[in-house]
Amino acid sequence: MRHGVRVFVTAPVFSVIAVISIAFGSGANVAIFSAVDALLLRPPVAVSRPDDLLIVGSRVDRGIGTQLRTSYADYADIRDRSRSFDGLAAYGFKSVGFAAHPHTPARIKVAALVSANYFDVLGVSLQIGRAFLPDEDMVPGRDAVAILSDDAWQREFARDRNVLGRTIRIAATDFTIVGVAPSSFNGLDPFTPHDIFLPLAMWPRVMGTVPISPLDDRSLRVLTVEGRLRPNVTARAARAELATIGSELEQTFPATNRHHAITTQTQTQMRLERRPVDTRTLVLLSVLSVAVLLVACANVAGLLASRAPVRAREIALRLAIGASRTRIVMQLLAESVTIAVAGSACGLAVGYAGIEVFRQIEWPTEIIRYPTFEMDHRTLSFALAAALVSVFAFGLGPAIQTARLDLARAVKTTDMNPSKRRRLQGRHALVAAQVAVSLPVLTIGAFVFQIFQRELNAGPGFRVSHIAMARLDPSQARYTIDESRRLFERVLDEAKRLPGARSAAIASEAPLWGLEVTSMVPEGYHLDDGQTGVRLYNTSVDESFFDTLAIPILSGRAFKNTDTAEAPRVAIVNEAFARHYWPLQDVIGRRFRLGSAQGRWIQIVGVARTSTYIYTGEPAFEVAYFPFRQEPRGNMAVLVQTSGDSAGLLGPLREMVRRIDGDIPVFDTQTMEHFYEARATNINGLAVGLIGALGLMGLLLSVVGLYGLVSYDVGRRTREIGVRMAIGAGPRRVLAMIVNQGMAPAWVGLSIGLVLSAATARALPLLVPIGPRYDLRLMLATLPLILTVTLVAAGIPARRASRVDPTIALRAE
């Protein structure tokens, strides 16, 4: 190792290039791994033996992903019948109105509704106090007890250890604090940290006055069930038992359980399936970062191989005095370790810079938060593994090649002087591979940039400026549906009278926040066998919604204030809905049934322009808008169009609602400009920047590799070049010869890269499900860039060769 360090120091140019190459390759992978680990792989903290836990439930389509969910009634049946688990714990979460003191205004918090055995099944020990007792989960609405998260304990009570027994107000109901969860545990959902834990039996109370029976309705599949396997019980055996239980429930309750088989999945599988867009983006970034690391390893391998002739006599002397070839390979690998360690140390700095970029991601809501991106022990372990892999990736081949020299010839000369083909074949192949990988990486970056740039230039399809937003949940103040409807009408009237307000509207889901998902049956539409309906994305809005957000009605009419519960049921659909179910037809007056074939008829009275609903670049969703007086929702967003700065209206809007009723939680108060920037512009710009940076890293490393190859070739052929120039070859001819020979592996790499890019074109829609199909012309757009930089890389040492003095070259050894 000491000798490896000396070799490292005595060849500074080679060492710096090698270290920078490994730093770029390993640093990119460290940064991407930190994001993949936080969003997909990191196990729940403070949970005992998380690998023994399985999620149990039926697959439920949430529109942009699937999850295993159960109803409370199904959970009770599974818990009582299953023998494969030591325990089955159920939990769900809901945003609730919270007040640390009974007479303070309500603020929004996330409450986890958990079964009494929740902490026992997970193996989580509380900091202070106790977990829930079994009888506190038996009688609906009886036991109003709560456990605080460590964050809530800190923010609301400054870690006062006398907090046990105090009363807090949740959903206009007094709860008694009985415990505090450990500091490292905020629930099992990485995107929705839980502030409070409540018994599942209190679910009806925190639902407010929503007209559903969450503990009785088998169709309400919103609970997650975690089961801890018994010793010596395999996951396959547990799935087989659950399949039998699910079949029995289907036969017993066909109206609610048909086509709802019960199965299991791990936490990682759940995260992969729940947010497929995020998963595919992370997969794409991971593939690109691995490609950059491979290019970096190929670059360093080429540099090591180019040094083999220089070190031929040294290796020959080692062999002559008794060193075995295995010992020589070990020594050369030890030298590679010094490069890998130095490169990985610098790579940690590159990775940390990448993690800081990820930390800029903001989810503009008080409910959902991104997990923390950290340079923790898992990330450092990955960095160490990447360093070890890179040592063998770039060091083993050159080490074996160097150790296989001709001893007699090497002792006589400083050049091994093998045949020309053997001399350059390996290094040419490495350069060709680098260029071949760089082309699809750059092409993907150009494609993603083009997609997002086009989407941002086209706009989201709704007004993004001069809009103030706030979200209200009157159900948390015990409002009935009718009372909520009247409240929102009053809020709208008073919002329109606020100074600077031009118009106001309400919607159950703000733009770019999401959509409700239900099923429907279009009139005259043929369903497949066994299909009871098709997916319908929907939202409830008032009659001012389309004008306030500047969403044009293309045909038919907007809603009216006469579209009440007593009037005929109506809906407005978007263009994608109309084209999908009634192409080339007038859809005004068409009908669809909500729910199933036995649901009520709803008549289409208008067609709105398709806009962006969930994320920028999304495929066209078929969306229906319902008038909120006919489809009231307990939780809605208030949108106020302003004539001036919308930020100045946020405070008056919040205070206006609190004057009406201080028990109503007002949350996610922000401007549409801020929301759109965080939800669309920033995160898309970050994705494009990361992909572009990975592509440029790969290209830069390829250029360095080509430059090193041509420089080595020029140094090796100095005498030959001198002879050529002495017998009449001009500088231009020498320049053209060196450039042509240097560009040969680049041309091979470009040819392979075009094939790889074409293959990527087929796979890319699976990884990036946005926009149109892959544009093959983008490959041609990146070719001039790659050709230019490769010509420069080959031309600089070639130009130096063309200026060789023949007399000096002929005297050189």
Image (cartoon, rainbow, N blue to C red):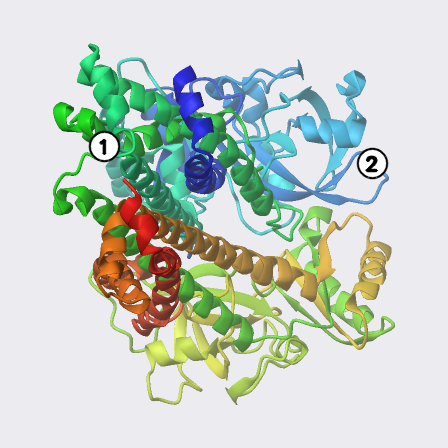
Disc on the earlier residue, 2 or 1? 2
Question: As rendered, which of 452 and 97 lies closer to the eye?
Answer: 452
Q: Amino acid at mark 1?
A: Gly
Badge 2: residue crowd in 10 Å (few <14, some 14–19, many ≥20):
some
Q: CA distance from mark 2 to mark 1?
A: 72 Å
Where does label 2 land, which residue? 102
**Residue at the farthest top position:** 322
Q: Nearer the viewer, mark 2 or mark 1?
A: 1
Q: Point out the image quarter for the N terminus.
A: top left
Quadrant of res 774: bottom left
**Residue at horizontal 59 percent and vertical 40 percent from the top:** 204
Residue 50 visible in image: no
Question: As rendered, which of 452 and 723 lies closer to the eye?
Answer: 723
Q: Which mark is residue 397?
A: 1
Q: Circle 1 sits in a helix, a strand or a loop, which is it?
A: helix
Question: As rendered, which of 242 and 465 lies closer to the eye?
Answer: 465
Q: In the figure, is residue 535 to the left or right of 424?
A: right
Residue 796 percent location from the top left of the image: 40, 58
Q: Amino acid at mark 2?
A: Pro
Residue 449 percent location from the top left of the image: 46, 65
